[in-house]
Image: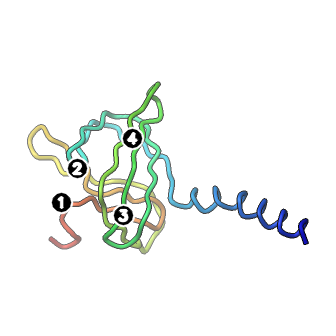
Amino acid sequence: MKRLLYSAAILALVSVPAFAAKNSQTVTIPEAVTVGSNQLPAGDYKVTWTGNGSDVQVTLIQKDKYSPKPVTVAAKAVDAAESHNGFTVDRQGNVNTLQTLQLGKTTLVFNGAPANGQ
C-alpha cells in the first residue's frame, strides 16, 4: 500500500509541470510596446497565464535579461478557431499598445483593447 501511495505521489508531482506548460509560450516582440501601464522593450518573452474567460492574469518575463522583472497584467482569454501565434498592436502616434497575443488556440485580449468588431 505504501508503494502505491508513493508511486501516486511521484506521478502527481511529475504531471504538475506538464499541466503548467499548457499555459506557457515564448513570443518575440520585435518593437517596444505598452501593455497595461507597463513599457516592454523589444525582445523574447516567456508568457504564462492563469484563469479563464474574462478573469485571466498574464505574466511576461523577458528571457534575454540577466535579472528580468515579471510584468503581470489582466486579460481575457478567447478560444480561437485556428491555431497560430501572433499579436496585434495599436499604433497611436509614438505609442505602440499591445492589444492581443494569439498563442495556439488561445487569444489573450488585454484589458482596454477593443473586442472584435468594435
Callout 3–callout 4 Cβ contact below 8 Å = no
Answer with mark 2 or mark 3, whichever residue precedes in sequence: 2
* CA distance for labels 1 and 2: 8 Å
Answer with mark 1 or mark 2, whichever residue precedes in sequence: 2
Task: Give the number of the disc on residue 36.
Answer: 2
x then y, percent, for residue 111 = 23, 60
Query: Who is closer to the viewer here, 8 or 47?
Result: 8
What residue would you read off at disc 1?
Answer: 112
Label 3 sits on a secondary structure element that is strand
Label 1 sits on a secondary structure element that is loop
Residue neighbourhood size for the residue with mark 2, other residues' Cα within 10 Å, grouped as few (<14), some (14–19), many (≥20) = some
* CA distance for labels 3 and 4: 16 Å
| Circle 4: residue type | Pro
* CA distance for labels 2 and 3: 13 Å
* CA distance for labels 4 and 1: 20 Å
x then y, percent, for residue 107 = 38, 64
Query: Who is closer to the viewer here, 57 or 116?
Result: 57
Callout 4–callout 2 Cβ contact below 8 Å = no
Q: Which residue is drawn at 27% across and 36% down?
A: 32
Label 4 sits on a secondary structure element that is loop
Viewed as shown, does residue 20 lie left or right of 109? right
Task: Give the number of the disc on residue 40.
Answer: none
Answer with mark 3 or mark 1, whichever residue precedes in sequence: 3
What residue would you read off at disc 4?
Answer: 70
